[in-house]
Image (cartoon, rainbow, N blue to C red):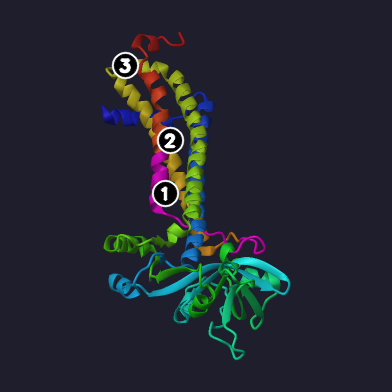
Amino acid sequence: MSQLNWYMARRYFFAKRSNRFISLVGGISIVGIALGVMALIITMAILNGFEGEVTRRIANFIPHVVISSKANIAELQALVPEAKAIYASTERKAVLEVLDDKMVLNVHAIDQDYWEYFLTDAPHDQNISGRLRRSEFELPGIVIGAGIADKYFITTGDTVNIQSPLDIRSGLFRIPQRHFIVTGIFRSDIFDFDRNLAIIEYAEGRRMFKSAGKEVIHMQLDDFNDAKEIKTRLINAIPDLEIQSWYDQHKTLFDAMRMEKWGSFIGLNLIILIAVFNIVSSLMMMVLEKTGDIGILRVMGAQSSDIRKIFNLQGLIVAFLGVVLGVLVGSLLVLSQIKWSWITLPDEIYLIPVLPVELYWSEVFMVGIVAFAIVQLSVRYPSKKAAKLLPLDAINYKR
């Protein structure tokens, strides 16, 4: 009986109908599902692209693992021999004074030996000139973000003053401060870093921030995706360590991007739901048109379950055509953007020259499964109504 069900389902779907409006509604249903699937694939690819771009820029510019508590660098090197670099750092809020203006910024004091590595792994399009060692004028070097430099028209070779109000001790009426010569300007294209971060030599930070500097150990890895596994390994070996991975340092941002992606996924499924109403309408009209045929099938021995399967299979055909069409068009558009970058972004608004997209086939598969599931749930009502028709009532319909 299953072959007969497939035959009748295909015949009802593809045969010419007396009422062309039913065919139109069925075609619109297929197009609606295809548009919904295509919109989902393209939207999720764009959100994946922006998330990946932000993730790479942040992970390439900050330490992959930060150990805040007291720890022994030699012990950490023994536990994580594959680490690319492990070094001490002092992090501190300070005040930058340029001419008569002041601003609060984050100052990171790191080991000079690792500064070149820090720059090498930074994102593209950067001015990374300069070192942190003292200049011929006996002033220590400082590297600042491009946002700070643009705000105050600072160039390499200029002198700035760093003040540390948190280091005022009892009996002192003068804010500890020190002059630095700008030896480099970096551009990470990340707002918080370019406008709020400055780098100085580790020894200068220890000398300047005597009371409230935050002592941490930074760990850089060959692959930032290994940070979670390294964090677990260190916690298991030294339970009292305070450790943050690059993801933990910006967890709010990454969680917001993830919620935005899945919120868009749920919202765009409404397009598929709209198409589902068309499917239900077309199947209900088809049940009315084929009521006589249903009666004849029942008299010839077809069970109510067979009638239900026939209309379920018609819904399956609609879902298959819509999902396949949506997946093909959506995936091709995303892949063409990856290959040819035909959609560009305005430089004055975005820091990315082209629209970033990343296609994950697991998500494409999930979109298709969800669309199939929604359609299959929607056709249960029309198929159930068709299965409940009594043979004599169906044969005498329209008489």
Label 2 sits on residue: 318
Residue 364, labelled with which disc? 1
Does residue 98 lie above or below 304 as drawn? below
Q: Residues within 10 Å of mark 1 (few under 14, many from 20)?
A: many
Q: Residues within 10 Å of mark 2 (few under 14, many from 20)?
A: many
Q: Residue furthest right?
A: 100
Q: For the residue marked with disc 2, what is the amino acid?
A: Val
Label 3 sits on residue: 298
Q: Earlier in the sequence, mark 2 or mark 1?
A: 2
- Quadrant of res 308: top left
In this rendering, which labeled residue sits more in front, label 3 or label 2?
A: 2
Count of picture labels: 3
**Tag 2, which secondary structure?**
helix
Q: Residue at x 49, y 57 (%)?
A: 51
Q: CA distance from mark 3 to mark 1?
A: 41 Å
Task: Examine the structure image and report whether residue 329 is included in the region drawn in magenta.
Answer: no
| Residue 275 image position (x, y, % from top left) | 50, 34
Q: Which residues are magenta?
A: 345-370
Does residue 358 lie above or below 390 as drawn? below
Question: Is residue 154 or residue 296 the one in the foreground?
Answer: 154
Can residue 31 be seen in this snapshot?
no
